Image (spheres, grey):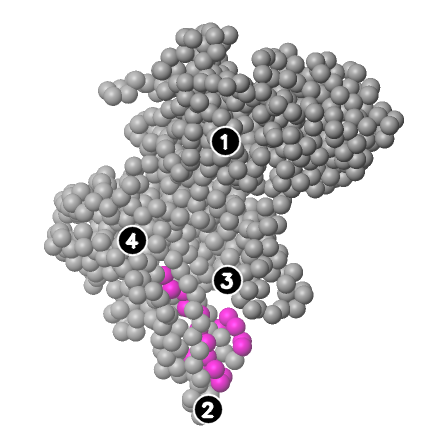
Amino acid sequence: MAVAPIVALEIGTSKVVALVGEMREHGNIMVTGIGNHEALGVRKGEIVDFENAGMCVRAALAQAEETSKVSIARVHLAVSGGHIQSVTNRGTVPIMNPDREITEDDVDQVMDVARAVQLNPDREVLHTICQHYCIDGQEMVIRPEGMEGAQLSLDMLLFHGLRSRLQNAIKVVGSMQVDVEDVAFSGLCSALSVLTGEQKKAGAIIIDFGAGTTDYLVNANNIMATGGALGVGGDHITNDIGMAFNIPRLQAEALKCKYGCALIGDTGNKHVSLPAEAGFQGCKVNLASLNTVINARCDEIFSMIRNKIESECSMHQVGAGVVLTGGGAHLKEVRDLASKVFEMPCTIGKPRNVSGLATTTHGTEYATCCGLVQYGFKTAVRQESSSMLGRWLKDLLR
Amino acid sequence: MSCRVCVIGLGGSGNKVVERMSGIAQDGLSVVAINTDARALEETSASMKMQIAPSLTNGLGAGGDSEVGRKAAQEDIVKITALCMDVSLVVLVVGLGGGTGTGGAPVILEAARQAGAMTLCFATLPFSFEGVQRKAQADRAVPLLNKVADALILIPNDRLSEFVGEAEVSESFDKVNRVLAKGVSSIAKMLIQPGFINLDFSDLCKVVRSSGGICTFGYGQGQGKNRAQDALSELLNGPLVDGGEVLSSARSLLVSIVGGDDLTLKDISSVMASVTASVSSSCNVSMGTVVDSAWKGKLGVTVVTSEKWISGDTEEQSVDVVLDAVEAEGVHESFDDRIDTRKQAASTAKSTRKKKAARMQEKLTIKQAGMDRFKGAAPSILDGEDGDIPTYIRRGIRLEK
């Protein structure tokens, strides 16, 4: 085994997960260790309480070390938050070669130009992903090397986020004496682990419905078209329920998980009872109202994502429909709501090509971490075979 | 000091309102119904009636023509002036849109002024189902009234349509008249009766004038032990107060509390506490209390608020302002461009109004507890809205408990 195990760390809003994975044949991942701790001090994917968040990371890493029997010195970190956005930039270079044949140097040059986007000084680029080349107005070229032309253009999709928020996440890990090897947008990781090759080709929208954030990524026309994150998620549903029925968070969360439904449906005048507990005197909640609260929030999140996607690309290019993942995908009938909002089929996506320890527990909520392990291996393999950064990114994300 | 008040109901709808008031006539308050239409006048049960210009109209009414109404009032100006002699306040109640009321009101107000009386005018704007013409006629009359009346209170009937509900036409007019009669009499009472904490016409004028003369009122009454609470809930549920919404946007507010000998300080303070809680901090609140032995065990609350009336007129005005600004900058455009600018300005005016509404919504929700979950993090702004506020609140969905 040439490549050392990869440790993926996700500091989520509801939980901190550390996953240790080894590379097996055919790109399969074997999970050898897992650490999972309830997250404290994280809101909407961003760290608000350094100390508590650090404690959770430490606990998760320690648990992962214990189960995998390796000591963790370096991790790959998944980041999310409403501040993460994507932008498409087109770079163009003239072909100077006398015979007008496009060389590797030209390709490298156009990549550099396409990557150079003027961003606000407080923002940092997370990923640069090649979309398509264009030679003298001929669009949708995938490999331009060897072709002829006077002008070469490249569309580059860039993900960027607020530097301070990204640094906060890195600092928390750094305070554990653990290095952060690479940082990846969690929506990208989820897409990596969940989407099949077919889905990528046909075009698919992946929505990672997390606790604090909802990440989305669109594959259309065989490229990554757009993506981003909204700072709302399952945590907001719980908060909405708590406010609507005037009940504590704990009860609201239980209510959401046990009875909550993303479609209002016909529940009649049915009520559900919440048993009394210490500090809570118990109450009855109208099921239809509960579902109305959940429906309003989910509908808003999906509609907003739809609007964002439609402003960037056409929905007709998405043939395989919507793939839902993340903890929020466990919500009852959320799949039906998503297919209603997007007017296309919707499936629940679970991490693929993963085996090992987490098999018994893995569900949609581990999609990001599994994807991050895959991301880690792919970058490592490409870095070995080719020193050119852009090349592996391009191949990896195609 | 005695204060004599004369309430004049002018025209068909004015007559109907004062008809309802004649039952509550009291010392210092006389009620007169004035109309051109002899038959309509005959039908009303008002204590004092006056037919004007029978020769001009043959006693048949103004036929919806405000010009006829104006002439009719002018013809009998001597009679009207005589009526207003030795009166300190003339309250004119008129339904705009018709002939007699719309045309005659400015004339009568002017006459009252000449006679040395202060003038307060209650005018209703027609329902939209009454047609464009009546509305236009009413709109033309408003600036005239504003000029001659010391205080003008406008009540768009459409605002009452929710309160009227599915009622038939005759019934809906009847309901509107009742609301008006209640309001007029409560305000008249507030001005006539001396109180502990006195409110007089100058206080009312201050409130009314601060809004450019356009304002609204609410009234609530309670009895027995919970009289303060009952009166307040009636007040806030009143058709013109719009569920308390009007209070929150009021710029100045006049509160009058009427009670019997048993009126306690606690009653007053609880009423004032709830009223002031629903207005903004910049609102100028004045209050008065009247003790009337006939009100034993009862409590009445009247509020008069000045409000920036958002009607088509104001929108156009703001458009003009913006347009003027554009022109002042020396931008020379073709006529088409100008129209575009006007449209744009209209849409900006609209959007600022929308924003205003959204802000108010936010203000409401901030009062609710439970947002501290997201306290430390930056707010999630989604399309200009605060995503941390529950969607069902922002979408205004009502939940069954």
Residue that label 2 marks: A99
Q: Is residue A97 above or below residue A220?
A: below
Q: In the rendered view, does B344 fall on the left or right side of B194? A: right
Per the model, the C-alpha gap separating discs 1 and 2 is 93 Å
Identify the chain of the residue marked 2, using the numbered disc in the image. Answer: A
Per the model, the C-alpha gap separating discs 2 and 3 is 31 Å
Magenta region includes residue A5:
no
4 vs 3, front mark: 4
Counting labels gives 4
Mark 2 or 3, nearer chain start: 2
Asked if badges 2 and 3 are on one and the same chain, I answer yes
Residue B66 position, x and y percent, is: 77, 36
* Amino acid tagged 4: Val
Per the model, the C-alpha gap separating discs 2 and 4 is 46 Å
Dot 4 falls on a residue whose secondary structure is: strand
Q: Is residue B161 visible?
A: no
Residue that label 4 marks: A79
The residue segment tinted magenta is: A137-159
Asked if badges 2 and 4 are on one and the same chain, I answer yes
